[in-house]
Amino acid sequence: MIRSLKIRNYTLLKDVSIDFKKGFTVISGETGAGKSVMLDALTLLLGKRIERYSIDKTSAKTIIEGEFSIQKSKLAFFEKHDLDFQELTVIRREFNSDGKSRAFINDTPVLLNVLSEFRNKIIEIHAQHQSILLKDEVAQFALIDRLAKSEKELLSYQEELQKYNQLKMELDLIQRSGSLSENELDFLQYQLEELENCNLEAGEKEKLEQKISILENIEGVMNVVSESEKYLNNEQGILSQLSSVKRKLLEFETFTELYERVASVIIELNDVSSNLASLDNKLRLDPSELLVLNNRLDVINKLLQKHRKDTVAGLLIYQQEIKSRIKLSSSSEMELKNKKIEIEDQFLVLQGKASDLNIKRNNILPFLKKEVESNLINLGMPYANFMAAINVSDSYHKFGNTSISFLFSANRGGELLEVSKVASGGELSRLMLAIKYISATLSEVDILVFDEIDIGVSGEIAALMGKMMQEISKSTQLIAISHLPQIASKADEHLKVVKSVIGIETVSNVKNLDKQARIEEIAKLLSGKEVTSEAFENARVLLSQ
């Protein structure tokens, strides 16, 4: 869960600190107050690229920092990227006025793709017309597999698919390498030897860049320590000068008090000098280490440029391809025939795994249909018709040999069409909520964000949506931006974004509302700027329900 979010110098948010708690948090505020800006800041923190126009040009930096409580189930992510695991993890991004940024996880510099991977593991953000769950096939497959508990079947299928693709690649290499000339073979052997001598490892380039960044910073600190020691201890240094002063003062009894004060300063500076020396020893950097790392990075970059690859993983794949081509360069027709038989056998295995996966997925579809339609009835759509359609194809991809579509009709007798083509804004919101209500307890993410998904609904339907969000928040931290009093009243915490003019500047702040302030805010949401006594009473009733 997210514990806190601090934003400095990002558009209207000049210095904002927000604390979040478990359960359901609602965020309200007038249009243009900065609610979506706050959500943008959260997505920036977790890897989104910034638009340069949103950076405050008058300040040194835009800084966004968040604290997250992390479950041990996420430990593999930290081990994968060689990061210290902390249950209270701090993420920070800093942006200069030119748009350049730095990112940190627990004070360790990381690349944006690492932040994005972290984001995908802890948070889902849904906005009206932009729900990944309703439009992205990958997210839909993930939902079906969680409900069907078919992750093991999917993994088994993917392992066989990898074997199948490897065999097809080997067949292609056999076919292409049969006509290699002696010069071509010599050249491939030279390339292979060059790559093998480098002992490359996947992800090595990124690790080197991180280590170099850290060591370069340490070198700067060491320079400061060394300069400080020099100013204190050389022949013309502070300690030498003060010792001379002390000797002079000792000659005159009238300066006894000054003598003692100077002596005290010398003792304190000697202690500082000792501490600096100790720190210098701790930070002592082998000058060759940074040189070795930079040289290694230079070798990798030259290989990437030479072979036109983007990553070390790409070089390793190319290395394997070369090795296979050399090995197979003298392959016979029999080898070609045997490889085709091997591929046919592996394809039968792959078909079987795909069939196992499809059976398990299809078995859960009636349950999904029943539960979604039941939830839609509770959300005021008694005639809604929903179906997840899985269609088998001849193409075998990462998620099987099928495609998936979410089909929907809001009206009795209506034709089932793809959700994105038929549902209105309010219908999309309710459909997405109905599905999330089913899958919330199975989701791997810890935080769920709804950005005004309640647009297009009101009254009793809004109250039903609020209750459903309340239920979801029992298993997942839920943050919702909403204008609806029926939803705001169901939250455990209520934050309000307030815009004000200070001098010539417009700024936004975030307030955590107490009980009385919540009554006032919900009354405003009910009746507008002119708040009536009836609106106050209705607000109290909503909060008490």
Image: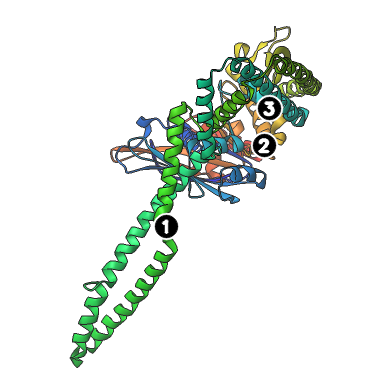
Residue 62 found in image quarter: top left
Image coordinates of residue 265 in percent, x first then y, are 30, 78
Q: Amino acid at mark 2?
A: Glu
* Residue depth check, mark 1 versus mark 2: number of the one nearer the observer: 1
Crowding around mark 2 (Cα neighbors within 10 Å: few <14, some 14 to 19, many 20+) is some
- For the residues bearing labels 1 and 2, Cβ distance under 8 angstroms: no
| Depth order, front residue of 211/408 | 211
Q: Is residue 440 visible?
A: yes
Residue found 56% across the figure and 17% down from its top: 180
Q: Amino acid at mark 3?
A: Ala
Residue found 76% across the figure and 23% down from its top: 368
Residue 444: numbered disc: 2
In the rendered view, does 330 fall on the left or right side of 350? left
- For the residues bearing labels 3 and 2, Cβ distance under 8 angstroms: no
Mark 1 lies on residue: 286
Quarter of the picture containing the C terminus is top right
Image coordinates of residue 336 in percent, x first then y, are 70, 16
Quarter of the picture containing the N terminus is top right
Residue 178: numbered disc: none
Residue found 41% across the figure and 58% down from its top: 285
Residue 438 found in image quarter: top right
Image coordinates of residue 220 in percent, x first then y, are 35, 54
In the rendered view, does 196 fall on the left or right side of 143? left
N-terminal label among 1 and 3: 3
Residue 142: numbered disc: 3
Q: Is residue 435 visible?
A: no
Which secondary structure lies at badge 2?
loop
N-terminal label among 1 and 2: 1
